[in-house]
Amino acid sequence: MRISRIKRRPDPAGRGPALLEWLELPRHVYARLEDGARVRPTFDPRQVGTGRVSSVQYLKFPVEGRAPVTIGIDLPAAAETALTPEQREALAADLAADR
């Protein structure tokens, strides 16, 4: 499963500090499955440097055909977002097409 999300910073001057703060973000994203299991994504380590993370991230979640129920992060500013039934149906259709 691949999820694309673009986070835009309206202030270009604030982009650098934000990318530094988000350096560990790819390691802290997860998809929660219906059984409660958390699945961590794989990502290209070249997207993360020593002083900043790429502003575009390509994450691949090994969900084995199961559509997640939430997407979250477990950094100090933790957040978890429930996927709507429509989002889950669309992901399930995409996952079925990948088989």
Image (cartoon, grey):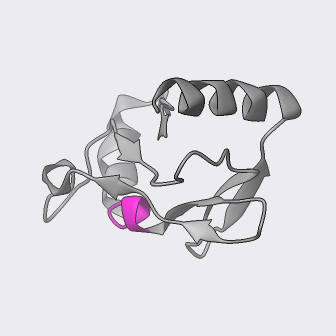
Residue closest to the far bottom: 76
Query: In front: 41, or 25?
Result: 41
Determine whether, in the image, residue 2 is placed left or right of residue 23: right
> Does 41 sit above or below residue 95?
below
Estimate the x, y position of residue 59 in percent, counting from the top left: 39, 46
25 or 1: nearer the viewer: 1
Answer whether residue 23 is magenta in the image.
yes
> Left or right: where does residue 88 sit relative to residue 11?
right
> Residue visible at 21% across and 50% down?
44
36 on left or right of 66: right
Whether residue 22 is visible, yes or no, is no
- Location of residue 27 by image quarter: bottom left
Q: Write down the region rendered in magenta.
A: 22-27
The percent position of residue 70, horizontal first and vertical second, equals 73, 53
Q: Position of residue 86 (x, y in %)?
A: 82, 25
Percent x, y for residue 90?
A: 69, 24
Q: 96 or 57, which lies in front?
A: 96
Residue at 17 percent of width and 62 percent of height: 51
Residue 76: name its quadrant. bottom right
Residue 52 appears left or right of 37: left
Q: What's the residue at 66%, 71% (across, down)?
A: 37
Please tell me whether residue 24 belongs to the stretch shown in magenta.
yes
Asked if one can make out residue 3 in the rendered structure from this viewpoint, the answer is yes
Q: Residue at x 34, y 40 (%)?
A: 58
